Image (cartoon, rainbow, N blue to C red):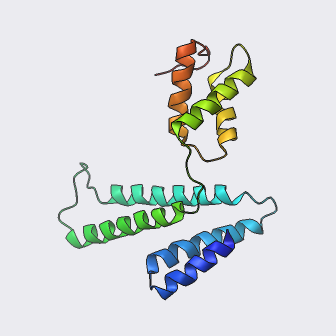
Amino acid sequence: MLDRITKDMAAARKQRDSTKVKALAMLKSKLLYNSKAPKPKDDMSIVRTYLKQIQESCICLGEACMGEQGLPMAHNKSLMDKYEREIMELHAEQDIIKQYLPEEIGEDAVNEMIEQALKDMGDEPKFGAVMGKVMKIANGRANGGIVKSLVEQRLREKTLISVDYELT
C-alpha cells in the first residue's frame, strides 16, 4: 500500500493537487508510524481510523459553525466561510482516502455470510455473536450498520432473538 500511496503522491504533486498530497502524506505518515510499533495493526484498520478522524473533524467544524441556539453564526461571515472551506477540503480528503479501502460488499453477500454464521452457531445464536462472526468474515468490507440491520431482520424472521439483546 505504501508504494501505491507514494506513486499517487508523486502524481498529485505533478498535478499540483495540494488536497490530495496533504491527505496522502498524512495517511503515509500514519502507516509508517504504525509499521514501527511493537504490535503493528493491519493497514486497513489504520486507513479506517484515519477516515473516522476526518469524519469527526467534519462534525466538530460543523458544530463550531453553529451558534448557541444551533443557528448559523451569521454575524461572523469570514469565520463561517473559513469553516465551510475546511469542511469541503475534509470531505475531499475523505473521498481520496476511501480509494485505499477494499470495495464494500453488497447486501446479498452479507446475507450469505449471515446464513453461514447462523449455521455455524447452532440452535440459539446470540445477536452479538452473529454480528461478530459476520464482521470477521467480511474483514472490513461490510458496513456495520447494514450488517446490524440485516442480522436483526434475519433473527426476527427466525424468531431467534436472544433475551440479552433488545431491539429498539
The quadrant in which residue 108 appears is top right
User: Could you tell whether 2 is left or right of 107 in the image?
Assistant: right
Q: Is residue 85 above or below residue 151?
A: below
Residue at x 69%, y 39% (from the top left corner): 137
Count of numbered labels shown in the rendering: 0
In this view, the residue in front, 118 or 23, is 118
In this view, the residue in front, 160 or 107, is 107
Residue at x 47%, y 62% (from the top left corner): 94
In this view, the residue in front, 129 or 72, is 129
x then y, percent, for residue 6: 63, 78
Q: Is residue 4 above or below residue 120?
A: below
x then y, percent, for residue 117: 69, 27
| Residue furthest bottom in the image | 14
User: Could you tell whether 45 is left or right of 38 in the image?
Assistant: left
x then y, percent, for residue 64: 34, 59
Q: Is residue 110 above or below residue 101?
A: above
x then y, percent, for residue 135: 64, 38
The quadrant in which residue 121 appears is top right
Q: Is residue 15 above or below residue 20?
A: below
Residue at x 59%, y 69% (from the top left corner): 27
Task: Identify the image quadrant of the N terminus.
Answer: bottom right
| Residue furthest left in the image | 75
Residue at x 53%, y 19% (from the top left corner): 166
In this view, the residue in front, 24 or 69, is 24
